[in-house]
Image: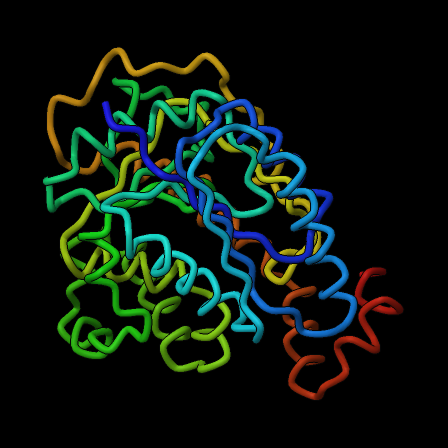
Amino acid sequence: MKESAVLLITFNRPDTTIEVLKALQIAKPKVLYVFSDGPRNREDALLRDKVQSLVDEYVNWECKFYRKLMDKNLGCGPGPVQAMQWALENEDRIIILEDDCVPSPAFFPYCNYLLEKYINDERIWIISGDNYCPEYLLSSDYIFTNYAHSWGWATWKRCFEKIDFQMKGWPEFRDRKMLYSILPKKEAHFFEQRYDNIFKDENSMNHIWDFQFGFCIRANGGLGIMPRSNLIKNIGYIGTHSEKKSFCHDRAVDDHYKIVTEPLFIVADYLHDRYHFKHHWKKMKSGSGIKSKIKKVLKIFGLYNFVYKRIYSLL
């Protein structure tokens, strides 16, 4: 079984990066790519230097090591895309970790096995390391799903080359109601609104990449893979896309996970996906109450940073 290269996307969080590096030190991948976006200010520059010093300290096993540090800050959307594009110039498959996604030791053999098994299967686009609903008992040690996630994941060059991060095909896909041929009506409507909001908002388009990736998977009739157990612990509670710990963060991982039983059919697990939508996506949406509405209004009038600490946290 071929061992895949690992891409670690870093920036300015030494406290979380060190935990990911400790996990990598145990796994000792033979090929490691480390990418960092450019600093936005002096504080970023100092923290990024600290992160890279940790990389120098902890990557102490024999491996092919590549590092790319950007001079200019690209942002949370183009930055990871640039990182993946860079690593996949030399690789036909890649395992991807961000600086707050701490993998179980079982994550790497899981990814390596499935990357090799499905390398030529055009139906499979993403191998997810996380499982937000491990209480739902699967019929095999992994499933195919329309709801794979990217907190610790793997993919192939053949998939990345097809991704349109500008979602140019979305208007036609939306107008022809193609999402409704993939998902039940309620779920299709939910994601139709999400994709449309992202497509119409240039700021969102430049600050995220995973929703565009998810759209391209669905637009190409692709599937993801999800493990029976959770294999990634996300410890990044504070960052660009998160202001506090959510139910998704800091989940226990299974260090002893192995693939013994495999799915009989390469189709999305219908019952799991309905459960997943109800207990993950609807739960995420339920958090968008009065706080989120106030936050949106404050941002519109440019008052968010000033008012947040004084008022928003008290609601």
| Chosen colour scheme | rainbow
Quarter placement of the N terminus: top left
Asked whether, in this view, residue 302 is left or right of residue 89, the answer is right
Quarter placement of the C terminus: bottom right
Q: How many marks?
A: 0
Q: Give above or below for 69 relative to 130.
A: below
Q: Give above or below for 151 relative to 10.
A: above
Q: Give above or below for 106 relative to 40.
A: above
Which residue occupies the extreme bottom position in the image? 301
Between residues 131 and 49, which one lies in front from this camera angle?
49
* Horizontal and vertical percent position of residue 29: 43, 31
Asked whether, in this view, residue 279 is left or right of residue 165, the answer is right
Between residues 181 and 228, which one lies in front from this camera angle?
228
> What residue do we see at 70% from left, 73% from top?
294
> What residue do we see at 14% from left, 36% from top?
267
* Horizontal and vertical percent position of residue 45: 72, 65
Q: Quadrant of residue 95?
A: top left
Asked whether, in this view, residue 309 is left or right of residue 5, the answer is right
* Horizontal and vertical percent position of residue 30: 40, 31
> What residue do we see at 65% from left, 50% from top?
52
Between residues 103 and 1, which one lies in front from this camera angle?
1
* Horizontal and vertical percent position of residue 287: 60, 54
Q: Quadrant of residue 241?
A: bottom right
Q: Quadrant of residue 102?
A: top right
